[in-house]
Image (spheres, rainbow, N blue to C red):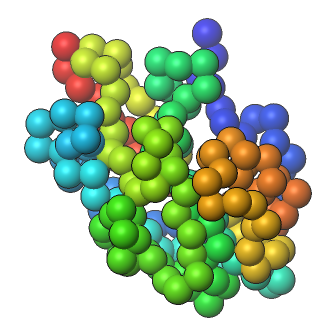
Amino acid sequence: MTANDPFARLPEVASFTVTSSTVADGARWPSAQYSAIFGIPDGQDISPQLSWSGAPAGTLSYVVTVYDPDAPTESGFWHWVVADIPADITELPEGAGDEAGRGLPAGARQFRNDAGIACFIGAAPPAGHGEHRYFVTVSALDVDHLDIPDDASPAYLGFNLADHVLARAILVAVGSIPA
């Protein structure tokens, strides 16, 4: 079986850079980025700090997502979805994805994740299920906002996002729970 690449069937786009003081690309999530909501010991459901640079000219907004394609479902698991981030914003502080979105910039909208709540929900791979990959993606868009309802699902947002992506920055964190 090959690894599930969430971008394999999407059109290729330019890339830019996303970094985090919370987790390095390819590194394990710290315990704060695991899920208390799903009962993971020491989990706190705290969204990671993110910074990005090098987005192309013409970028009018950003979308940030955190997605686990290795979840034991047929559709993976969306942990966080934030859209309509203004083009002049290039950083989100750690904890921006709380239920009130207190760390999000004005105009940004946080959508419900696959747990049904509009916030960051931390990693919660089933015990013994092996290592999961968490794709932290910043997409640079050619529109200043997505014309979708506030209660849109992550998949619906992704469908409407596809035609507006100018470039994509990806950081992959990993996590697992021992058996």
User: What x and y, as percent, mark residue 20?
Assistant: 39, 66
Q: Which residue is drawn at 59% across and 82% down?
A: 107
Left or right: where 10 falls relative to 76: right
Q: Residue at x 68, y 42 (%)?
A: 155
Left or right: where 20 falls relative to 128: right
- Identify whether 146 is placed above or below 143: above
User: What x and y, as percent, mark residue 166?
Assistant: 81, 67
- Identify whether 150 is placed above or below 72: below
Q: Which residue is drawn at 51% across and 34% down?
A: 77
Left or right: where 72 falls relative to 37: right
Q: Which residue lies furthest to the top in this view?
A: 1
* Quarter residue 138 falls in: bottom right
User: What x and y, as percent, mark residue 100?
Assistant: 36, 69
Q: Nearer the viewer, residue 107 or 79?
A: 107
Residue 49 showing in the rendered view: no
- Identify whether 87 is placed above or below 22: below
Residue 60 showing in the rendered view: yes
Which part of the image, by quadrant, shows the N terminus? top right
